[in-house]
Image: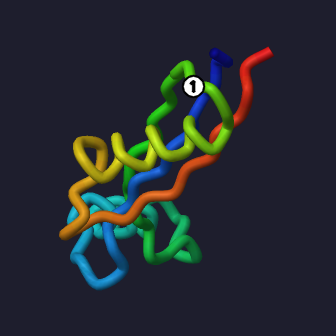
Amino acid sequence: MTKFQAEIDVMPKKEILDPQGKAVTGSMKNLGLAEIQNVRIGKHITLELEAESAEAAEAKVDQACKSLLANLIMESYTFKVSEVA
């Protein structure tokens, strides 16, 4: 078994309203940073796992995202798996 680390980004889907991002966008104007627009707030998750191969690790991470880490109705996710030295 090999140890892997996954970096996962979960974001609200583009068509879903992001109230937290909208609030931050509004605050940017108050801070004199009006050129910063369309802020979207999401989650960044890191985890470690053991698997027989990179492909098996990716399949496990994908399953974890679909089952628990992302709400597929409202969120999308991307991830990168790398071997831990």
Q: Which sits in the foreground, 47 or 15?
A: 47
Q: Find residue 52 and report its horizontal and vertical position in percent.
A: 62, 26
Q: Quadrant of the C terminus?
A: top right
Residue placed furthest toward the bottom: 15
Q: Find residue 44 and report its horizontal and vertical position in percent.
A: 46, 41
Q: Find residue 1 and report its horizontal and vertical position in percent.
A: 63, 15
Relative to 15, say whether 84 is above or below.
Answer: above
Image check: 2 left or right of 9?
right
Q: How busy is the neighbourhood of tag 1: few (under 14 within 10 Å), some, or many (20 plus)?
A: some
Amino acid type shown at disc 1:
Ala
Query: What residue lies at 57% left-to-right and 25% top-to-bottom?
Result: 51
Query: What residue lies at 73% left-to-right and 19% top-to-bottom?
Result: 84
Q: Which residue is mark 1?
A: 51
Number of marks present in the image shown:
1
Q: Which sits in the foreground, 17 or 76?
A: 76
Relative to 4, say whether 76 is above or below.
Answer: below
